[in-house]
Image (cartoon, grey):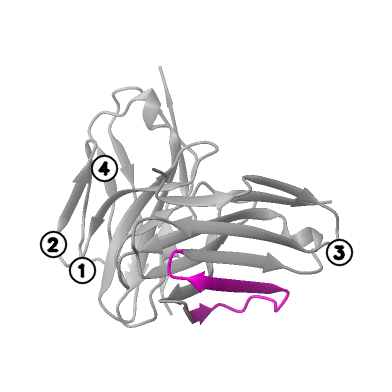
Amino acid sequence: GNSVTQMEGPVTLSEEAFLTINCTYTATGYPSLFWYVQYPGEGLQLLLKATKADDKGSNKGFEATYRKETTSFHLEKGSVQVSDSAVYFCALSDSGTASKLTFGTGTRLQVTL
Amino acid sequence: DTAVSQTPKYLVTQMGNDKSIKCEQNLGHDTMYWYKQDSKKFLKIMFSYNNKELIINETVPNRFSPKSPDKAHLNLHINSLELGDSAVYFCASSQAEHTEAFFGQGTRLTVV
C-alpha cells in the first residue's frame, strides 16, 4: 500500500536558520506529492505540490523537489521566520488508487527569535 | 467567501448521543472528503464522494454515515458516540481526482 514517512519532530530553529524536513514515500502508481501546513487552531493549507518526477514545487520561500530515484520530497527553506511555526505534513495522492491523500505523521516546527 | 466551511467548529457531547457535522464548498469541486485527525495530529481518510457517489469508505465503523445531498455538500452523521470518537474532523474538496484538496477549518469533537 501507499505510505509517507516524515522525520520526527519537533524541530526547533532560530530565526533565519535553514530548514529541511525529510519526506519519503512508497506508492503503487505514479503519485502527486504535496506539502500542507497547519497553523495552530486552523485547518490545513496547501503549501506546494509536484505532480511528476523532477518537478519542483515552491511557495513563500519553501521548496521541494520530486525525486523518483530516492522516492523523496524533502521540504526546504533558506531562512525561516517565527511566523513559519506550524505543523508540516507531507502527503501523496496515488493515481493507482481511488482519490485520497495519504499523509505523513506531521512535523512540528518551532522557530524562535 | 469561505471556500470549504464546516459547522460547528466545536462540538462537546455525551457518550451515546447522535450528532452531525455539516460541510459545504463553494468551489464547484466534484470530489469531497472527510478526514479524521487524532490527538497525535495523524490524518486519515474516512470517506470520499465524487458527484454525490461514495467512492471510499475506509474501514470506518458504520456508526459514521456520510450523506451528500448535492455536489456542494457532504455531511457526517455519527450515531452512539464513543469516547474514542473524540478528534478533529476535516472536510475537504478537490477539483478532480488526484488534485490538491482544499480543507475546511475542522470540527473539534469531544465526547465526554
Write down the residue under mark 4: A76
Do callouts 2 and 1 point to residues on the same chain? yes
User: Pointer 1 and pointer 4: residues touching (CB < 8 Å)?
Assistant: no
Chain letter, disc 3 residue: B
Write down the residue under mark 1: A68
- Quick one: SS at disc 3? loop
Q: Position of residue A51 (x, y in %)?
A: 21, 65
Mark 1 neighbour density, 10 Å: few (under 14) some (14–19) many (20 or more): some
Question: Mark on residue B16?
Answer: 3
Q: Is residue B102 left or right of residue B78?
A: left
Marks 1/3: CA–CA distance? 48 Å
User: Pointer 2 and pointer 1: residues touching (CB < 8 Å)?
Assistant: yes
At horizontal 44% and vertical 67% (from top left) the residue drawn is B32
Do callouts 2 and 4 point to residues on the same chain? yes
Chain letter, disc 1 residue: A
Answer yes or no: is residue A67 visible.
yes
Give the magenta range. Answer: B55-72
At horizontal 83% and vertical 61% (from top left) the residue drawn is B17
Mark 2 neighbour density, 10 Å: few (under 14) some (14–19) many (20 or more): some
Marks 2/4: CA–CA distance? 15 Å
Q: Position of residue A95 (x, y in %)?
A: 29, 78
Do callouts 1 and 3 point to residues on the same chain? no
